[in-house]
Amino acid sequence: MAVDQMQQSSASQPAEAAGSGDANGTGSTAEGRRRTLLFAAIVGCVIVVGAASFWLYSRTYESTDDAQVDGHLNGITARIDGDVKAVHVEENQPVQAGDVLVELDPRDYEVTVEQARAQLLKAQANERAENPNLPITQSTSQASVSTSKSEVANTEAAVAAAERDQLAALSRLQEVEANNTRAQADVARYKSLVEKNEVSRSEYDQVTSTAKALAASVDSARASADAAQKVVDQRRAQLDEARSLMVSARENAPNQVAISRANLQSKQADVQAMKAQLDRAQLDLSYCKIVAPVTGVISKRTVEVGEHVGRGQRLVTLADLGDLWVTANFKESQLKQMHPGQSVTISVDAFDQDFEGTIEAMPGSTGSVTSLLPPENATGNYVKVVQRLPVRIRFKPGQKGLERLRPGMSVVPKVWLK
């Protein structure tokens, strides 16, 4: 019995040991599996959170690498023809506004200035000579009108006097004719009385002599009356002439004054024209020194000493570094939430520095529309292409390092969609 129990217990011990080993192996495998699943879950959560965070972050801005710094490139041209006397700048040289860049030979233009000044002096002398003529003409015209009025008045008085003399002559003629008629009647009456010896011959001769004298007086009075009529006619003709001269003086006086005033204005206009010519000549002379209109850097020089340059020919190109901006060509699908005033972070490829800016203006058209050969979609070969539009971004002033920027530098702007 004891032996059997011992055998059974010894047989049962290995079995228990084997059972115990199976249980421990199964437990270790399950725990490792749980740890693997937990690690995978954690990694998955991290990836999901990271992806979600990146997605949310990417929705807060729009960016493009198709962007560059832009600025004003001032083409400095010659405003006159001339030979280059000196060139004071080289490429990449900084200049200040007002610095002399190029000098042209000024001698021809100095001669032109002297000629224009002489012409101006001559025109001013002519104006001074013409200036007194206007008041003289005005005085002369007024005197002529006054004189003609006086002449008319005098002639009218002369006509009146002649008419009075004519009336007196006619009265004298009538009186003499009446006396002559009576005398002739007396002669006829005395003739019959003499024949009857009722009066003496001497009385008859006296009456006859008186009648002859009165007959002669009639002729004289008639001649005087005719002469008086002619005087009246002459005075009336003189009156008509005086009145005509007065009308002519009244009409011509304003015209003469107007002519004198026009001559004076013509001389004054000549003076103004000569002043303009002198100003033009002095301007051309000043253009012999070509100066920088703005502060900047010479980016290209295309002129040499001794060259003959023409009006409008470009001599140097000046980059204005005081007014720079960024032209960023965003895709049209990126412009949904963009508007002027949004903040922009600008990364410059040339050096490790970011700048702050703001959107200054949204584009007016796509780049393809304003290109030299815009697409013509009506020809039937239309293929939809995502268009790019230039957005202007202005640098915020006062930032350190802005003076290092140059037009054409590549940048990466990041527009914050707030």
Image: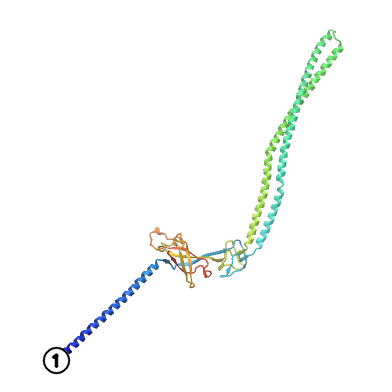
Pinpoint residue 392: horizontal percent, then vertical percent.
47, 63
Query: As drawn, is 202 to the left or to the right of 315?
Result: right
Quarter of the rendering occupied by the C terminus: bottom left
Kind of element beneath mark 1 = helix
Q: Residue at x 83, y 8 (%)?
A: 195
Counting labels gives 1
Note whether residue 234 is visible: no
Q: Quadrant of residue 235?
A: top right
Image: 201 above or below 313: above
Return the residue found at the far left: 1
What x and y, as percent, mark residue 13?
A: 19, 88
- The x and y percentages for residue 372 are 47, 61
Q: Residue furthest bottom?
A: 3
Q: Is residue 94 left or right of residue 370?
A: right
Left or right: where 118 falls relative to 16: right
User: Label 1 sits on what residue type?
Assistant: Ala
Judging from the image, the colouring scheme is rainbow
Asked if residue 277 can be seen in this view, the reply is: yes
Q: Is residue 222 above or below residue 311?
A: above
Q: Residues within 10 Å of mark 1 (few under 14, many from 20)?
A: few
Q: According to the image, label 1 marks what residue?
A: 2
Q: Residue 132 versus residue 218: which sits nearer the camera?
A: 132
Q: Nearer the viewer, residue 292 or 286?
A: 292
